[in-house]
Image: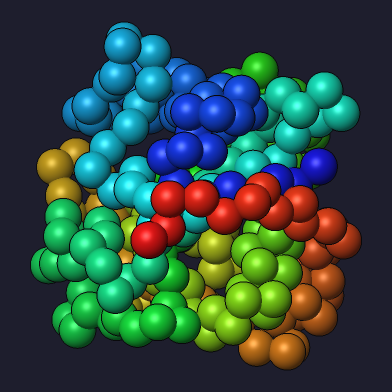
Amino acid sequence: MVIVGNGTSHAIADGTLRRMFEERKRVFVDLLKWDLPVLADRYEVDQFDTPHAVYILVTDDMRRHCGSARLLPTNRPHILDTIFPELCDEVTVGSTIMEITRFCLSRHLSACERRLTRNRLVSAFAEYALLHGITTYIGVAEMRWFQQILAFGWQCLPLSPPKRSGSATLASFKINITTQTIDQLRASGIYTPVKLHHLPIQDAA
């Protein structure tokens, strides 16, 4: 199942979203050692987890978290313009542009399950964008992950040359979403048909 939720009310009320924040803590804080805020020593939640954030989650048949990502509207504060403005020669913002953040695959998955979950998430990005009039995704990634994003087959372009940030080399990018995107993902073997299950919209005022 692919679930689309928004805002803090869903995070509080829906157990699947709570498990997403738990997994984010296990991946980004415990494994990758990112310096991020942790709520109740259990959930990775930062200043961008607002009522305007959109969450896309891949779950198994028991609605256990397998993978997730957060989409941020760029006409509000987001990571590229707030934390990493030096990674972008000109920050791209607009009502049809969203930022992909916190791409997270659960640590309990096998290598095969991780690949399948990744493909479903990427496919969900395309489906969500086409359904909601999103023309562009932007984001920041370490170089190894950025090279994977480029290989997915969609129209992905760097926003500036890669730059060092601490011990990592980071790249900013944009992904143009068009009516050809799904065919491009299908041609590269990434696309998996998905059905998006939208939770009722909450908190977005």
Residue that appears at 81% across and 30% down: 60
- Examine the image and state in which quarter residue 143 appears: bottom left
- The colour scheme used to paint the residues is rainbow
* Residue 173 placement (x, y as % from top left): 39, 72
Q: Is residue 26 left or right of residue 89?
A: right
Task: Please identify the residue farthest to the top as the structure is shown.
Answer: 41
* Residue 78 placement (x, y as % from top left): 27, 60
Residue 23, compared with residue 147, is above or below; it is above
| Residue 136 visible in the picture | yes
Residue that appears at 68% across and 31% down: 66
Count up the numbered dots.
0
Residue that appears at 46% across and 82% down: 96
Residue 143, compared with residue 76, is above or below; it is above
Task: Please identify the residue farthest to the bottom as the structure is shown.
Answer: 179
- Examine the image and state in which quarter residue 141 appears: bottom left
Q: Is residue 14 left or right of residue 138?
A: right
The residue closer to the viewer here, 22 or 141, is 22
Residue that appears at 31% across and 10% down: 41
* Residue 19 placement (x, y as % from top left): 56, 23
* Residue 57 placement (x, y as % from top left): 64, 43
